[in-house]
Amino acid sequence: MDRAIRALIGEGEFTAFVAVTKELVEESRLIHGTFPTATAALGRALTLVGLMGLNLKGREKVSIQILSEGPIREIYAQGDPEGNVRGFIRWPDVDLPPTSDGKLNVEGALGRRGMLYVLRDFGYGEPYMGMIPLKSGGIATDLAYYFTISEGIPSAVAAGVLVGKKGEVLGAGGFIVQPLPGTSENRIQALEENIKKMPQISRQVAEGATPEDILQMIAQGLGAVVLAHKQLQYRCSCSRERAERALLSLGEAELIDMIDRDGGAEVKCEFCGRKYQFSRADLELILSRIKTRGN
């Protein structure tokens, strides 16, 4: 079972969010048919947005979107306070040779020419959007840079995915750690040293590490208290009603053309691959609603 924890490190000096996400990243791979490098890229984004969701309440949602000039082109991941995550990748068949240290080359697949966007939807009013240019293309480093530059919160961010010889996900997880105001430089340096000494998160998870195990490595010598647990899962919120609203947004001319040319429509969810079929009669009913709304 994939889980995340929220904790305090030290004497309330740092907040920490730690997750194991092997199962949801594997489910994402199966849904999208991703090749290893693309699996790792989307898996990192899903892990991090799941961690960010731990800070949400009610109907709030948070999304990460990356648009780049690398071969992947686009990644989108969304999380909510219930531990649900979903996402998509523009080109799932991207797979590059590994880096010199044997890791999946996510940085090469995304590249450094592009933008990272963070969208916070509070469930009312206009969503808040922050953005930064990509710094590394590794996603975790880029998100850490975003927190520092756009939200003024220095952060340690890590996410990793270990893929097997057949493309299956062997391990996945990540963390976000942020100092609270007033934390001394000595304590920050101690935490940074702990993080530098840590082995790869994805490999730890593949060997059976839990979120609590990873937290103890991060907080070695500082102490930590777990405040909350949350189960994480890949779950899409699409529905036939949402698919219908998408057709409504096309407008009268395009719907008429769709009825005349195809006699129906199929709407496929980018997040989960579910398909919704609309007959000629369905489209004509939607068209009548548009005409009624226009009168």
Image (cartoon, rainbow, N blue to C red):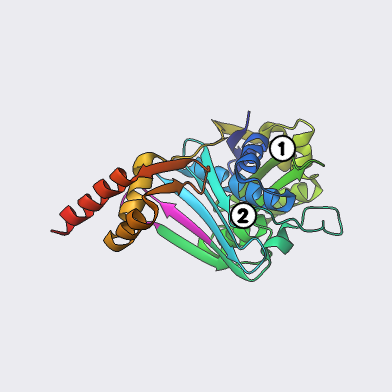
* Left or right: 159 in relation to 235: right
Front residue of 265/193: it is: 265
Q: Quadrant of the N terminus?
A: top right
Which residue corresponds to mark 1? Answer: 214
At 69% from the left and 64% from the top, the residue drawn is: 136
At 49% from the left and 52% from the top, the residue drawn is: 63
Q: Position of residue 172 (x, y in %)?
A: 70, 41
Using a 10 Å C-alpha cutoff, classify the residue at mark 2 as few (fewer than 14 neighbours), some (14 to 19) or many (20 or more).
many
Please say if the residues under marks 2 and 1 sit with CB atoms less than 8 Å apart: no
Front residue of 240/7: it is: 240
* Left or right: 7 in relation to 236: right
Q: Is residue 85 above or below residue 38?
A: above
Q: Which residues are magenta?
A: 117-127
Q: Earlier in the sequence, mark 2 or mark 1?
A: 2
Q: Examine the structure image and report whether residue 70 is included in the region drawn in magenta.
A: no
Which quadrant of the view contains residue 74?
A: bottom right
Q: Quadrant of the C terminus?
A: bottom left
At 61% from the left and 42% from the top, the residue drawn is: 28
Which residue corresponds to mark 2? Answer: 155
* Left or right: 201 in relation to 150: right
Q: Is residue 66 above or below residue 11?
A: below
Front residue of 267/153: it is: 267
SS category of the residue bearing label 1: helix
